[in-house]
Amino acid sequence: MSRDLLVTGIGELATNAPRSPDLVGVIRDAAVAIRSGRVAWAGAAADLPAEHAGLPRFDLGGRAVVPGFVDAHTHLVFAGDRSDEFCRRLRGEAYEEILAAGGGIHSTVAATRAAAFDDLVTAAGERAWRMLRQGTTTIEVKSGYGLDTATEVKILEVARAVGERVPVDVVPTFLGAHVPARGMAREDYLDLVTGEMLAACAPLARYCDAFCDRGAFSVDESRRVLRAGREKGLRPRIHAEQLARTGGAWLAAEVGAASADHLDHATAEDAAALRQAAVVAVLLPAASFSLRAPQAPARMLWDAGVTVALATDCNPGTSYVESMPFVVALACLEMGLTPEEALWAATRGGALAVDEPDKGWVVEGAVADLAVLDAPSYRHLPYRPGSDLVWAVVKDGGVVVG
């Protein structure tokens, strides 16, 4: 529900206002006026316009405020447990070996196919609530654990139900091209994805994604899927260059994808193509951390002028991470981004990756999504990894946590 609110007692407000010399547009001793769920005014409390003084007040006692986190890449809806697989990887087994033996995505597919709709809603809803309590107010949610039409539809319907039951915004993505379904000829599965499955899923999704990588789909196969999605009104996204450099980043640029995600093996040439095509690079440091793999070249991508976003890649096998504050810390400690760059990428960058230009900043007209930190500054996000720093969350102008 959209509400009117005056947030006062803000010790430090990170606005992400454009052209800010410090990138994140810090205002100290600040206030934010919210009307009908939108930011009506943000600035120094001493400059608060009299017209907003009578709004209901929420005093933060000097705490810091950042925009609500936008998690632009998750696999939130799934069933099953892959902790055994995690331990196998720790013992030295490669993910591709586990996948070839029927584990990995295939084990999650079997469990998700067997799960009841209400059970999936309950489990995914609990994850969404935990994300919300850690400051995430918008979550992109992919299908891809069905690999048959009925289950892919079920996953997207679950995602919609989660958005109706938890005060977060859900951005749905069709990922029928996650991996080829077991027991089907490759060409038959591509026919299914681009035909019956896409027709059934397109009304439930905003984007069409493809896993373009070693062991998944080739550039030509991914192009076929993404073009079919475009014909159904779904903008492309793509998993690219995670396990090897296969050309997924160039394909993202070619098809005008909203984002190219992972990019662990991206090169300077890939960065130039993404920048020129205005494709957002969604980086997933928790996945590389969990897989004990090299991190994506965040510093190179940022310095090349690519718009960078950060996301959790929350999934049961390779990144069971629900915390965007932890991802911010990893981006600084493992990827080489500054605290300002990581915060911007986790908020404004994520909003741009899901085509939500009114989110990810605290400026007049923006959606009033705020995360209140029990800390004096946003710098505490990377400084205190693993700490429970989110004290309250404002969604559409209403206090939903805290």
Image (tube, helix red, strand yellow):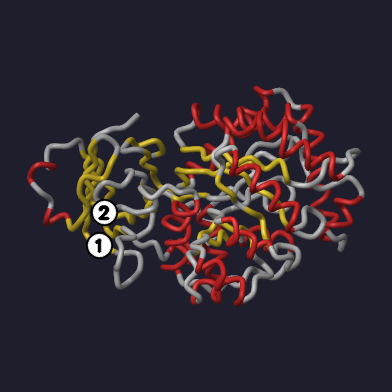
Q: Amino acid at mark 2?
A: Ile
Q: Nearer the viewer, residue 280 or 315?
A: 280
The secondary element bearing badge 1 is classed as: strand
The secondary element bearing badge 2 is classed as: strand
Which residue does the image show at 75% across and 35% down from the upper left? Answer: 146
| Image quarter hosting the C terminus | top left
- Left or right, residue 53 beside residue 209: left
Give the residue at mark 1: 27
| Image quarter hosting the N terminus | top left
Let me know if residue 134 appears in the view. Answer: yes
Q: Nearer the viewer, residue 266 or 364?
A: 266
| Residue 305 numbered tag | none
Which residue does the image show at 66% across and 39% down from the upper left? Answer: 143
Which residue does the image show at 28% across and 33% down from the upper left? Answer: 3
Residue density around tag 1, few if under 14, some if 14–19, many if 20 or more, within 10 Å: some
Give the residue at mark 2: 10
Q: Quadrant of residue 248?
A: bottom right
CB-based contact (under 8 Å), mark 1 and mark 2: yes
Query: Which tag, 1 or 2, sits closer to the chain's start?
Result: 2
> Where does the image place residue 128, in percent across and percent down from the top left?
55, 38
- Left or right, residue 232 beside residue 377: right
